[in-house]
Amino acid sequence: MQRTFAVIKPDAVAAGHQGNIIAAIQESGLKVVALKTLHLTEAQAKGFYHVHAERPFFGDLVKFMTEGPIVAMVLEGENGIKRWRDLMGPTNAAEAPADTLRGRFGTNIERNATHGSDAVETAAFEIGYFFNGLELAGL
Ligand code: CMP
């Protein structure tokens, strides 16, 4: 069993797609083991995406991620990191296949509906950034 961190981004929440996205996660066999809705501050978004701090798109990314509420989740399943990334599709929603979540609900490389951890170490950081031990206990 492997845990990964997932976000439904402000564009998809504002458009009311969170129900469809959570349904797709459950239909795929991944289990939602923790979930919360929150509206990130600028500092919180910068901390979450700190690995991208030097990238030219960092400012726009932080602005987008703070424009409205997000849904943060911990997903669990065999090979969970890759399965969630496959379900989302490629980062650039404009090029994502129509049967992926980014293809269905995203717009472009920035407004791409969802986020998922890209590795075991990233998943550990991202889960810990959003959820404390008590929120994950017993699951
Ligand atoms: P995400 O999986 O959340 O991880 C970092 C995000 O940065 C990524 O999704 C994209 O939304 C965004 N991103 C990556 N590359 C670019 C880019 N070239 N221009 C704008 N945003 C980008």
Image (cartoon, rainbow, N blue to C red):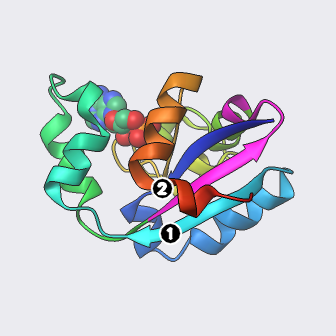
Numbered disc total: 2
| Rendered image quadrant of residue 35 | bottom right
The residue located at (25%, 55%) in the rendering is 64
Left-right relation of 53 to 118: left
Cβ atoms under marks 1 and 2 closer than 8 Å: yes
User: Which badge, 1 or 2, comes first in the chain's sequence?
Assistant: 1
Asked if residue 91 shows in the view, the reply is no
Give the residues drawn in magenta, as a range.
71-82
Q: Where does the C terminus fall, quadrant-wise?
A: bottom right
Q: Which residue is mark 2?
A: 131
In the image, what residue type sits under mark 2?
Phe
The residue located at (56%, 70%) in the rendering is 17
Where is 91 relative to 28, above or below? above
In the image, what residue type sits under mark 1?
Lys
Q: Which mark is residue 74?
A: none
Where is 119 relative to 47, above or below? above
Locate residue 75, reporting x and y percent: 68, 49
Q: Which residue is mark 1?
A: 36
